[in-house]
Image (tube, helix red, strand yellow):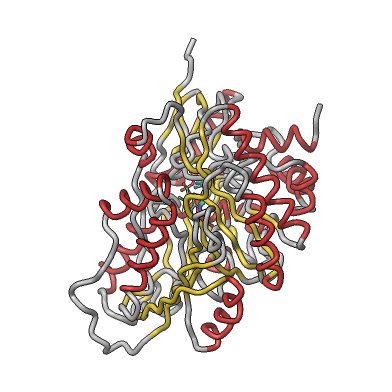
Amino acid sequence: MNPGLPVNDVHAQLNPTLVARIEYPDSTEQVSAAVRSAALAGSAISLCGARHAMGGQQFGGGTRLLDLRRLQQIGSVDSARGLVEAGAGVTWPDLIAQLHTQQGTEAGPWTIRQKQTGADRLTLGGALSANAHGRGLRMRPIIDDVEAFTLVDAKGSIRRCSRTENAALFRLAIGGYGCFGTITSVCLRLTPRRKLERRVEVITLDRLMPALAERIAAGYLYGDFQFSIDERSPDFLHRGVFSCYRPVADDRPMPAEHKELGVADWKQLTHFAHTDRARAFKVYAGYYLSTNGQLYWSDTHQLGVYLDNYHEELDRELGATVKATEMITELYVPRSQLVDFMTRATDLLRPSGVPVIYGTIRLIERAQESFLAWARENFACVIFNLHTEHSPTGIELAAGTFRALIDAALDLGGSYFLTYHRWARRDQVERAYPQFGEFLRQKTVHDPAHRFQSNWWRHYQTMFFPT
Ligand SMILES: Cc1cc2nc3c(=O)[nH]c(=O)nc-3n(C[C@H](O)[C@H](O)[C@H](O)COP(=O)(O)OP(=O)(O)OC[C@H]3O[C@@H](n4cnc5c(N)ncnc54)[C@H](O)[C@@H]3O)c2cc1C
């Protein structure tokens, strides 16, 4: 008997799963054939892009896994409307490079509006399925950047989905974590490529919201606040590097040399973040301050270094006896409650024994379009990367800390992101997403045979509809 093929998520590596087989379709027609073949065999299908989600959304034990990264076609830019059609397996660096190849690299041509920060080789299909967001100061989640997409449904039928065609599927599949079908191609809304100037200050949390309001009023487009992670310092979660980006004249010369953190710098910073968090923040802040006034492009400034499997080397260097990685969580709070939330988070995290390896605050604008909408209002978004040991105790410590952070956000009228883990209790899920039960019912309406299955969906199906 086939024992199954092992797969896991890239960042946390806490979702080891055995799938029955892996298929790599490279066209919509091949995806359709794969779904029909699975239906004939009575098999379930799971869907993955670059495997960065951390709640088990991309794998289902025993399923046929469709790895969609070969859906790579990129069409010509519609320069009149600022649109491009791109395969759901395309990753951000490839899309940006292709847009440059088609139109040149100067200011003016169309390019992407936003992408996730912290990792680049994530697919368009994965971004839509999580309804991801970046560090735009006045942006909604990525649904706002989507004109239409092509989806292969549970019967293997090919459906175009937009706000006017198959509109219910449009709302369900964006932010639907692969439960409603396979997205094969996306028509993405673009924006003109701009030159931006980075402005950097180190400020305290109490000044952040007024400072953000000032930057927005002054026309800044992107920004975030990367806070101190040193739990022994009064600065912990309180002082941070505040960086914002504003458009400048197209004729400002772009310097040939650019200060940026390379692979070796990131390795060193990651090492300090695990061993000497005061130093990590000092080095990080020093580097950012040294780039004050530096020019960037509006698309490529959203790219960064991600070190694949970086924790393995770190574990070796630190002589760790138990494997560890970082788990991420993202909490949302009404902007007026940010300081209160961070005070509660400080009180929770300082004695928790779970080191914060990285953390940032950014903004999101309200968006109610997707069925499982998470940006219920204009929230402040707080991200924590927590060091997590892969032992039952280590995992429960991180999970318990995440649940306590979710309670703190919910008590202040906030919410949390479903992408990063499935550790929330049912009452937390329902408070953050009152529509979750209906989301699961809609899944069964659109996919009565439950052709598309993942560990994530199975977890919630059992949680909400125990048999
Ligand atoms: C280091 C790191 C940084 C991150 N930063 C951010 C951030 O700044 N902002 C943010 O919003 N998120 C962020 N994320 C989360 C990330 O956006 C999501 O996990 C995203 O789904 C990853 O895309 P992927 O290609 O890896 O998809 P996968 O992890 O492979 O899949 C994620 C989900 O998408 C579904 N899926 C994938 N492709 C398709 C398809 N073609 N059709 C239908 N369903 C599909 C899968 O079934 C699964 O449910 C980050 C994650 C990591 C690990």
Residue lying furthest top: 1
- Residue 147 can be seen, yes or no: no
- The image shows residue 298 at horizontal and vertical percentages of 38, 74
- Identified at 59% across, 55% down, the residue is 330
* Side (left or right) of 206 relative to 98: right
Q: Quick one: 27 or 142, which is closer to the camera?
A: 142
For this orientation, the residue located farthest to the left is: 256
The correct choice, above or below, for 373 with respect to 461 in the image is: below
Between 404 and 220, the one nearer to me in the picture: 404
Q: Quadrant of residue 108?
A: bottom left
In this view, the residue in front, 262 or 115, is 262
Q: How many marks?
A: 0
> From the viewer's perspective, is 273 left or right of 130?
left
- For the C terminus, give its image quadrant: top right
Q: Can residue 463 be seen in this view?
A: yes
| x, y percent for residue 70 | 37, 44
In the rendered image, residue 124, in percent from the top left (x then y), is placed at 46, 55
Q: Is residue 210 left or right of residue 32?
A: right
Asked if residue 28 lies left or right of residue 141, the reply is left
Whether 242 is drawn above or below 30: the answer is below
Residue 434, position as x, y percentages in the image: 79, 53
Q: Residue at x 63, y 39 (%)?
A: 399
Q: What residue sits 36% from the left and 73% below the top?
A: 289
